[in-house]
Image: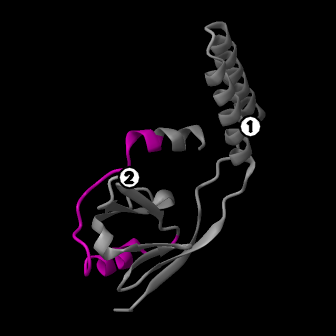
Amino acid sequence: MENKISWKALEYKRKEKTADWYWAVILIALSIVVISFIVNDALFGILIIIATGLLLSISLTPPKVFEISINQKGIKTGKEMYPFASLESFWVEASDKSNQKILLKSKKPLMPLISIPLEEHNHLDVREFLLQYLPEVEMHEPLGQKIMEKLGF
């Protein structure tokens, strides 16, 4: 078996958003801002305005392409390195051909689950390589993350 597996992937799957999506976000945000000012919570209203601006800005930014590589030391995604010593287990989610990914369970409490897209790379090769270093434990993405993907984030 090879000493390294590598491929390129998009930072995230971009969903084209319609004008209706932008209008809905703006109207919901404005409603929350008005309500927050009515109940004398101006700070929350300002926070919503800033968050909405960031959300709209991020939604207009195209995803970056980054290099993913797996070697004997760990998994590298772009500039981020995940050493095998900092990981507990992995799962290759390949039920949907268009949305294959590696799920890594980290030992760090603030980053418990790491999701890495597989793109067109053969998931069986990746699984076989990872089995040399980590145990395979079935896991699934959190419901919140799946909902956010459906909403276009």
* Quadrant (top left, top right, bottom left, bottom right) of the C terminus: top right
**Which secondary structure lies at badge 1?**
loop
Let me know if residue 3 appears in the view.
yes
- Which residue is found at the position 60% from the left and 42% from the top? 152
Quadrant for residue 28, please give it: top right
**Figure check: 69 above or below 27:** below
Q: Distance between the residues labelled 1 and 2?
A: 34 Å
Q: Give the range drawn in magenta.
A: 120-146
Residue tagged 2 = 110
Q: Nearer the viewer, residue 9 or 111?
A: 111
* Quadrant (top left, top right, bottom left, bottom right) of the N terminus: bottom left
Amino acid at circle 1: Thr
> x and y percent of residue 100 in the render?
45, 61
Left or right of 94 on screen, residue 8: right
Left or right of 48 on screen, residue 82: left
Quadrant for residue 20, please give it: top right
Residue tagged 1 = 18
Let me know if residue 121 appears in the view.
no
Q: How crowded is mark 2: few (under 14 residues within 10 Å), some or many (20 or more)?
A: few
- Which residue is found at the position 60% from the left and 71% from the top? 66
Quadrant for residue 96, please give it: bottom left
